[in-house]
Amino acid sequence: MSQTYRRKLKTLVGASSVISAANDSQTGVGITRAIELAKIAEREKITGLFTADLLQADAAGLAGTTGTQDPLIALAALSQVTSHIGLIATVSTSWLHPYNLARQVGTLDHISGGRAGWNAVTSSVGEENFGESQLPPPQERYARATEFIEVMNALYDANERAAVQRTASGGIRLDHSKLHPIHYRGDYFQVAGPLNVPPPPQRRPVQFQAGQSDAGVTLGARYAEVIYTSQPTFDAAQTFVADVQQRARRFGREHNPPLIMNSFHAIIGDSDADVARRLRDKHERINYEQGRLRVADMLGGEVDLRDVPLDQPLPAALIPELAQVHRRQGRAAIFRGYALEGLTLRELIIKAEETGHWFVAGTPETLADAIEQRYRAGVLDVISLHGLGQPDQQDLLLNGLLPELRRRQLIDNDYVGNDFRSSLELAPLT
């Protein structure tokens, strides 16, 4: 199915929790805690730090939080206290401009010594903060994203590495004949170029893409080097990867399809009884009234679930058709499927705690079994692990799950190569 056994499984940790920990009043002011956790991740040979980016603060705590840091700035700070770990910033192709972003991500690649990546998302929120009265429809957001990626790639590819050289006296000599404009003219962007940042160490920082709607999968199959997806079941993962690879072949990528990245939400316990206790405690902490809002958000945000009894399935009239959903269609498809299976509202609220991601509760050995199944089937190349920075899970992640994955020879024991692209063992750029 996906990439075969020329590489080990690559590991990421969600850096959003690492970065937001910078404001943890119990651990000091500033970025002290984030630095500590980034150093731990690198010591454990984690391949990369992966950030989300939330572009609004929502009173219900569903669409955003004021605890979020800007990922590019925060990762730039962490680049100075690490030397090998990759640094991936999620960015919105709907609200940002590709020329500015090419400069920012290119700069991050320089100051990190070739460790930058960027995750393109079309965004399902934020229109009120970026000059729009309403969220553009999905087809428009993906058309804009296509041009955005084309501009970024063209800017990075146009300038020759030899354009910038250091003289014997230590100065900088610029050869303007090796800086090339791109003269890009599309429906959304007109960019002359050239990029005024020297060619990044990786030439192109590694490009991730997240989005599970039909248009999102097509975009990822065409351009992404790593596709970030939420596939809660093994069967769904197999179907998704087969679809991605079929589409990638249509774009001439039969020999270098995107790597498949899944986010792995887990409860780790040191015994079955400990797992059951942790799972019970997790469910007891759920605010089920707020959970109604979360499920509505997972279904596209236009559903009123206030009067639905917790222990009954959703009435069919409240389950939206995907054509009616304009926000997060991929996530809505997952929860629409759950609702059509007859899950009760309470069960949907429990599912929504993981926002549709792959979730397993178990001992390190049980979790490793689930991970190994997907890796051996060729539907998992990169896994985003949770638990770093969480006092009740960090020890079992670092001293339980990671050693078990290494014992099975599933993950790397050290970094591969000198930059993020080589650590992921991506095919060379042509």
Image (tube, rainbow, N blue to C red):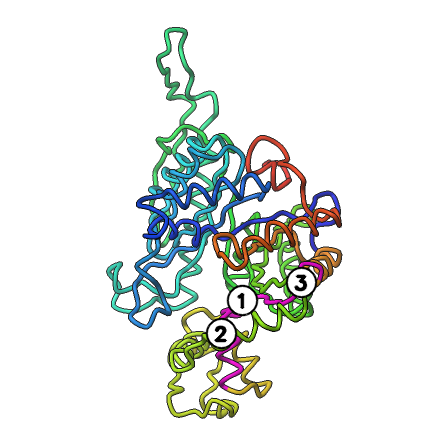
Q: Residue at x 39, y 18 (%)?
A: 175
Counting residues from the start of the chain, the first of labels 2 and 3 encountered is 2
Residue hosting label 1: 214
Q: Which stretch did the figure color magenta?
A: 345-365
Callouts 3 and 1 close, C-beta under 8 Å:
no
Number of residues whose C-alpha sits closer than 10 Å to that of mark 1, classed few (under 14), some (14–19) or many (20 or more): few
Residue hosting label 2: 352
- Given residues 73 and 289, the one toward you in this image is 289
Amino acid type, callout 3: Thr
- Given residues 107 and 81, the one toward you in this image is 81
Quadrant for residue 250, please give it.
bottom right
Callouts 1 and 2 close, C-beta under 8 Å:
no
Picture disc at residue 363: 3
| Image coordinates for residue 89, horizontal then vertical, percent | 43, 47
| Image coordinates for residue 50, horizontal then vertical, percent | 49, 50
Picture disc at residue 116: none
Q: SS at mark 1?
A: helix
Q: Is residue 263 left or right of residue 243?
A: left
Q: Residue at x 74, y 49 (%)?
A: 4
- Given residues 329 and 117, the one toward you in this image is 117
Number of residues whose C-alpha sits closer than 10 Å to that of mark 3, classed few (under 14), some (14–19) or many (20 or more): many
Number of residues whose C-alpha sits closer than 10 Å to that of mark 2, classed few (under 14), some (14–19) or many (20 or more): many
Amino acid type, callout 1: Asp
Residue 1 appears anywhere in the view: no
Instruction: Nearest to the eye among marks 2 and 3: give it.
Output: 3
Counting residues from the start of the chain, the first of labels 3 and 1 encountered is 1
Q: Is residue 357 magenta?
A: yes
